[in-house]
Image (spheres, rainbow, N blue to C red):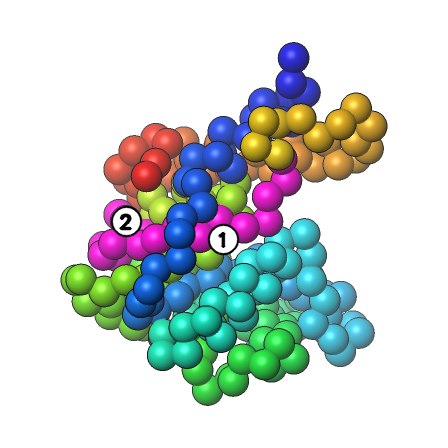
Amino acid sequence: MLPVDVWLLRPLENRFPRQVQPEHVDGIVVLGGAIAAAVSKDRDLAILNGDADRLVAFAGLARLYPEAQLVFAGGPPATPQSGMTEAEGTRMLLQQLGVSSGRVLYEEQSKTTWENAVNALALVHPKPGQTWLLITSASHMPRAIGAFRSAGWPFLIPWPVAYRTTTNGWMGPFQPVGHRLADVDLAAHEWAGLVGYRVQGRTNQLFPGP
């Protein structure tokens, strides 16, 4: 029997399989959540957390598609207590990874995934027929795709990253308890978020899929 953390998390991560890279991409949206803002501010460095693959994938795809419009959607703005914003940390990191800051539009006012979708849509006005990629962690992709669809985005290709489980769910018998508890917390957050978004009308399905 699979451990409870895998049982909860694996269906989220497997909901949107990785797709073949398209020949042409008009734009790429990456969701925030990869920067440890307070530590980054304290150390004056862009410090990544467990969702670092979001920005690594973003930088790689930016190089692969040099003509694509790049959008970072994250927030909220800094407060005296929060230190560096996600956008500030992301700018620092992307410059280190060779992505010109002039290529990236920053939507940095959002506090939720729904606001990411709405505000990014207003920022770039994607046109029907265009091809856009959406990058976020695999466990977050169902809620993110559901929100972006409901907000009015045209066709999006999901680009899930930052996996925490294997394809068959088995991660070995000696996973630290702390890691398992963190995965349970993450999965519970996403399942609750899916229910909440459906109740609020921010997704058209309880469990959005391909």
Magenta stretch contains residue 98: no
| Distance from Cα at disc 2 to Cα at disc 1 | 15 Å
Q: In this view, which residue lies farthest toward the left? A: 128
| Viewer-closest of 97 and 30 | 97
The magenta stretch spans which residues? 148-165
Question: Is 33 on the left-hand or right-hand side of 102?
Answer: right
- What is the quadrant of residue 198 in the picture? top left
Q: Position of residue 169 (x, y in %)?
A: 61, 27
Q: Which mark is residue 136?
A: 1
Let me know if residue 81 appears in the view. no
Let me know if residue 143 appears in the view. yes
| Viewer-closest of 5 and 22 | 22
Q: In this view, which residue lies farthest toward the top? A: 1
In the rendered view of the protein, which quadrant contains the C terminus? top left
Q: Amino acid at mark 1?
A: Thr
Q: Position of residue 6 (x, y in %)?
A: 62, 27
- What is the quadrant of residue 84 in the picture? bottom right
Q: Secondary structure at mark 2?
A: helix
Question: Is 125 on the left-hand or right-hand side of 140?
Answer: left
Q: Is residue 130 above or below residue 196?
A: below
What's the residue at 67%, 65% (across, down)?
37
Q: Which mark is residue 149?
A: 2
